[in-house]
Image: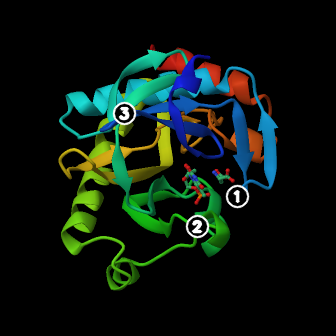
């Protein structure tokens, strides 16, 4: 596309980030998909466009509910303009049902419904394999302040209510998801960043428990793009 005119600041496994202007970024969603810290890799035509549309849909919904997200506006089919933030190197994992690494860690059956929402943290560091980290260690290592950490937890739970309620009306269960946060370059405000897509969430049909997310790829349960398109269709975007 015409993005060569922007400076590429960072290329991750699923996105490219360009400088749009002093306070804004251009975020491009790639067709690449990876799992298990990049050990498994493929290219799936249209994945970038679908994930951009789904992320955009959720960010707009959250912005309307006064959650400060980085989403500003669409740029093209596979990219949007976002607030430039200084990333807080944490992955915030929110769980409503047991799945994935939680089941492996504790030997719990997949689908076990938690009485309350569980918020966990990982240190965002690919070389270390994003290890889990406690709140005390986050504070001792001065990754962020106690006040910001508390706000992150509160916002993550509010996001859970908003998204879970919406998805419920579409007969989809929000099983778990990953959020990232940054502090806006312009005004220092805590901002929800990154993406909210089937790459970073688990979505199950509330009747059949069929997955509409990256588990289709991780566990080789079928065609990834068909699952993402089915989610897209159900969301009425
Ligand atoms: P997990 O069960 O593998 O820990 O994943 C929990 C949720 O977080 C799941 O919805 C997928 C998402 N996730 C990411 O978006 N990126 C990651 O690197 C990992 C490990 C999980
Ligand atoms: N996002 C990670 C990777 O690409 C892990 C995962 O989602 O399974 O390797």
Give me the residue at 49% from left, 33% from top: 27
Estimate how packed mark 1 is, as few (under 14), some (14 to 19) or many (20 or more) residues with alpha carbons within 10 Å. few
Kindly indicate whether the residue at mark 1 contacts the one at mark 3 (C-beta within 8 angstroms).
Answer: no
The reply to whether residue 206 is in sight is yes
Quadrant of the rendered structure where residue 216 is?
Answer: top right
The reply to whether residue 231 is in sight is no
| Residue identified by numbered label 3 | 82
Give me the residue at 46% from left, 56% from top: 95
* Depicted 200 relative to depicted 38: above or below: above
Residue 69 on image: x %, y %:
30, 39
Q: Which mark is residue 37?
A: 1
Kindly indicate whether the residue at mark 1 contacts the one at mark 2 (C-beta within 8 angstroms).
Answer: yes
- Give the mark nearer the N terminus: 3 vs 1: 1
Kindly indicate whether the residue at mark 2 contacts the one at mark 3 (C-beta within 8 angstroms).
Answer: no
**In-image side of 17 versus 187 (left or right):** right
Element carrying mark 2: loop
Q: Which mark is residue 130?
A: 2
The residue closer to the viewer here, 231 or 25, is 25
């Amino acid at each position: 596309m015409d993005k060569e005119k922007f400076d590429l600041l960072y290329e991750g496994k699923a996105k490219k980030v360009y400088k749009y202007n002093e306070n804004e970024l251009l975020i491009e969603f790639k067709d690449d998909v990876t799992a298990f810290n990049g050990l498994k890799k493929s290219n799936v035509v249209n994945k970038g466009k679908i994930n951009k549309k789904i992320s955009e849909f959720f960010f707009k919904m959250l912005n309307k509910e006064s959650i400060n997200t980085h989403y500003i506006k669409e740029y093209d089919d596979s990219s949007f303009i976002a607030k430039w933030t200084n990333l807080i190197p944490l992955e915030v994992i929110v769980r409503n049902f047991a799945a994935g690494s939680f089941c492996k860690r504790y030997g719990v059956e997949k689908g076990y419904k938690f009485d309350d929402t569980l918020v966990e943290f990982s240190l965002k560091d690919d070389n270390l394999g994003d290890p889990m980290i406690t709140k005390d260690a986050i504070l001792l290592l001065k990754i962020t302040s106690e006040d910001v950490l508390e706000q992150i937890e509160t916002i993550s739970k509010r996001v859970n209510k908003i998204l879970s309620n919406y998805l419920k009306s579409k007969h989809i269960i929000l099983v778990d998801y990953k959020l990232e946060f940054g502090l806006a370059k312009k005004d220092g405000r805590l901002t929800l960043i990154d993406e909210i897509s089937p790459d970073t969430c688990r979505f199950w049909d509330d009747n059949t428990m069929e997955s509409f997310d990256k588990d289709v790829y991780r566990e080789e349960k079928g065609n990834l793009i068909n699952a993402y398109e089915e989610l897209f269709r159900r969301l009425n975007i």
